[in-house]
Amino acid sequence: MSKISKIPHRLYLTEDQMPKQWYNLRADMKDMHDPLINPATMQPVKVEDLYPIFCEKLAQQELDAKTQYIDIPEEVLEMYKIYRPSPLIRAYNLEKALQTPAKIYYKFEGNNTSGSHKLNSAIAQAYYAKEQGLEGLTTETGAGQWGTALSEACAYFGISLTVYMVKVSVEQKPYRKAIMETFGSTVIASPSNTTNVGRAILKDDPSSGGSLGCAISEAIEKATTTPNHRYVLGSVLNQVVLHQSIIGLETKIAMDILGEYPDIVIGCAGGGSNLAGLIAPYMQDKLTGKANPRIIAVEPASCPTLTRGKYAYDFCDVGRITPMAKMYTLGSDFKPSPNHAGGLRYHGMSPILSKLYHDGFMEAVSVEQTKVFEAATLFAKVETILPAPESAHAIRAAIDEALKCKESGEVKTIVFGLTGTGYFDMSAYTSYIEGTMTDYVPTDEDLQRSFSTLPKVPEVL
Ligand SMILES: *Cc1c(COP(=O)(O)O)cnc(C)c1O
């Protein structure tokens, strides 16, 4: 039953209605995901193992599967209020364009300079670093959203930040680098001569354009060899999933006010952080038997982690220095084709989401990038927001579900996550518009090749 007769286009919660705690989905999972493994000992990671790499509070959050709700620190809430609560928008114009009886809502996370949801975790991570008295952080960035988000957060809390940015991205997206530098960050094109890993790669191949895995390895080396510095990561980790729960909690409050409950919740999945955050309270309802909405992860056909990956222990980085996680993975050596412009190119998936998918609590679909950009341009025309290519994966799946409703006449309520804006992805839009964009789908042989590099982990630990 709708509490108001005409649902507004945009619903903004008030600051008072904003959640004051993050929700830890693991507390409601009856079957827990497998533990992180320390590759040096082949034993489950202990919290002390993580202290040299991560801030202490964040290391504790990483391994905390019990505490159901965790207070959001006051200082973090203060910065959240600069751009949150984010709007929940009824896609009336998209519904009209599709002539669907479905009701489509989206939660828009692009209302900040970084242009994505990544700021939600960046703020928390920078805050805990400050609280611990650290001087600086290091991280990597590929396309640049994470580096930008963390630069914003570190500038706000007065912490220095060094960003290792994949060299080809520095060349393709010089303005992303400029934004990070505007916030005071040091941006280093990776591979670089500032680390042993970087020097070794350059010695082998002086013209290397770099990769995300290489940038991660450089950032970790820099953090662990510089006094009072730590490393931070913007996706995949349990702590990031925790911070991103703010997206779903706000969505649920807003939907409750509207008297709505989704039949289908949809999100794009790279490392899984926005999806896990968006679905958190709805997954809670599923896990506790209160409701049973469909939950759909959408990934690129060129990097099909959930739909064609293996559920196995793997490293989170190409340099093989991070702990190993049991997750859906294509193998840490997997690289999607260079023709792939649509983001979401990570080889693994959040261990929490991997477990939930494995146990049948959610579905996954993969989509080809020309279909994704078709959805993105339709959405931009009718809803007036230029979506990030990553977000457009969720748009694609939402449109497909809405079109099924058109056929069947069912009035389903669909919610999807619009994770960000695509202003730095215009070369991808151009190649779509000019018709030069191609679709790439790896063959089974391609996948077998990268599966063969999966680490061997004893069955019983
Ligand atoms: C990074 C990013 C994603 C993918 O990351 P997840 O951890 O899977 O959420 C999706 N959309 C945008 C706009 C991003 O910047």
Image (spheres, rainbow, N blue to C red):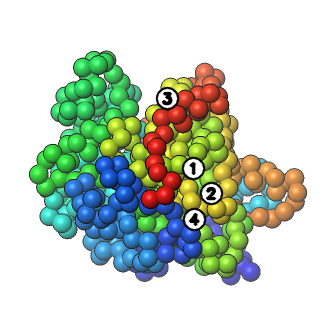
Which amino acid is tagged 4? Ile
Where residue 328 appears, x then y in whole percent?
A: 55, 49
- When asked about the image quadrant of residue 380, the answer is top right
Which amino acid is tagged 1? Tyr
Residue at horizontal 65%, vertical 72%?
A: 286
Q: Decide which of tag 2 and tag 1 comes sooner along the chain.
A: 1
The residue labelled by disc 2 is: 358
Q: Decide which of tag 3 and tag 4 comes sooner along the chain.
A: 4
The residue labelled by disc 1 is: 311
Kindly check if marks 3 and 4 are in contact, taking CB atoms under 8 A apart as contact.
no
Residue at horizontal 52%, vertical 34%?
A: 452
Front disc: 4 or 2: 2
- CA gap between label 2 and label 1 equals 8 Å
Kindly check if marks 2 and 1 are in contact, taking CB atoms under 8 A apart as contact.
yes
- CA gap between label 3 and label 2 equals 36 Å
Above or below: residue 181 compared with residue 414: above
